[in-house]
Amino acid sequence: MTGFLKMHGLGNDFVVVDERAHRHDLTPARIAALCDRHQGIGCDQFVTLRPACAEGADVFVRFFNADGSESGACGNASRCVADLLARETGQKHVGLQTRASVLHATVVRPGLVTVDMGAPAMGWTDVPLAEERDTLHLPIAGDPAAVSMGNPHATFFLPAPDSVDPSVAGPGLEHHALFPERANIGFAHVTSRDAMRLRVWERGSGLTLACGSGACAAVVNAVRRGLVERTCTVTMDGGELCITWRESDGHVLMTGPATTSFQGTFSPEDYPR
Ligand SMILES: N[C@H](CCC[C@H](N)C(=O)O)C(=O)O
């Protein structure tokens, strides 16, 4: 049997499996089956914990989408794992090794976490794009901007709130030829110099109630466009994140809740390999 924790950040939900003591034969097909909301446990992302092998890291975290593909970053799950590790160690600072980098998180109080998501990468090869283009103005209708937060994001700035349905526009944009690794697609509406509404169609998982890295990407892109100040509240369907793109070192700080829903067990052999 494999134990798991069900956690969420603003309704972006995760199955977390601890593989630090031993591995559980979790193939991409098996992960996709477990993520299924009708025939599996159900979640937006599947998260595994392994022993860290990078300096300053307490744990090696891997993030998988509901289709079984892997992502270099997941902001909401990073807060959840930091909250979990902090409870385990009694320390409020947690180092998370991800495929993209080592992230430093601080548990402000149980259930409220700040993650230093590092510096955004804005070059066309960083996102990545398929060809050399200005990432601040992609040649796609609606004029989105692109950035990498350890995973690829494009943000559209809508003149009116909810004037685009992410479930309709998202799938085609996720697979647009300009994004060789696909992309997470954000639809933002800036409401003031320090606030925006955001919905994200996530690569490999579809529409979620919140996307932490997407919120970071939206604020970075909005600052680059001169639309908001460097500290901005991002309101998504599942709730709010506070994002600061720090001037001193260019790092993006994301603060928001981390919640544990329940724990359970499953047998990997019950799912297709
Ligand atoms: N929900 C996550 C993002 C998952 C990213 C994933 N969909 C991808 O990059 O493929 C977040 O809070 O940042």
Image: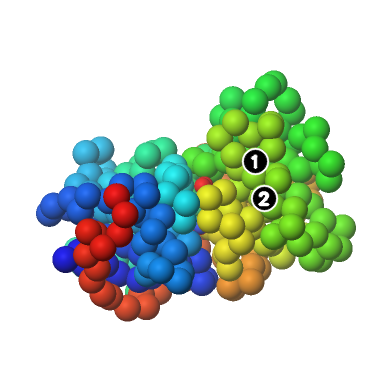
**Is 48 situated left or right of 12 in this image?**
left
Q: Quadrant of residue 228?
A: bottom right
**Amino acid type indicated by mark 2:** Pro
Q: Residue at x 83, y 45 (%)?
A: 142
Q: Which residue is mark 1?
A: 175
Badge 1: how crowded within 10 Å, few (<14), some, or many (20+)?
Answer: some
Q: Residue at x 51, y 72 (%)?
A: 11
Q: Position of residue 213 (x, y in %)?
A: 54, 52
Mark 2: which secondary structure?
Answer: helix
Residue 56 in view of the camera: yes
Q: Position of residue 172 (x, y in %)?
A: 71, 46
**Is 82 situated left or right of 38 in this image?**
left
Q: Residue at x 80, y 33 (%)?
A: 139
Q: Nearer the viewer, residue 212 or 111?
A: 212
Please say if the residues under marks 1 and 2 sit with CB atoms less than 8 Å apart: yes
Q: Residue at x 59, y 73 (%)?
A: 239
**Amino acid type indicated by mark 1:** His
Q: Which residue is mark 2?
A: 171
Q: Residue furthest right?
A: 159
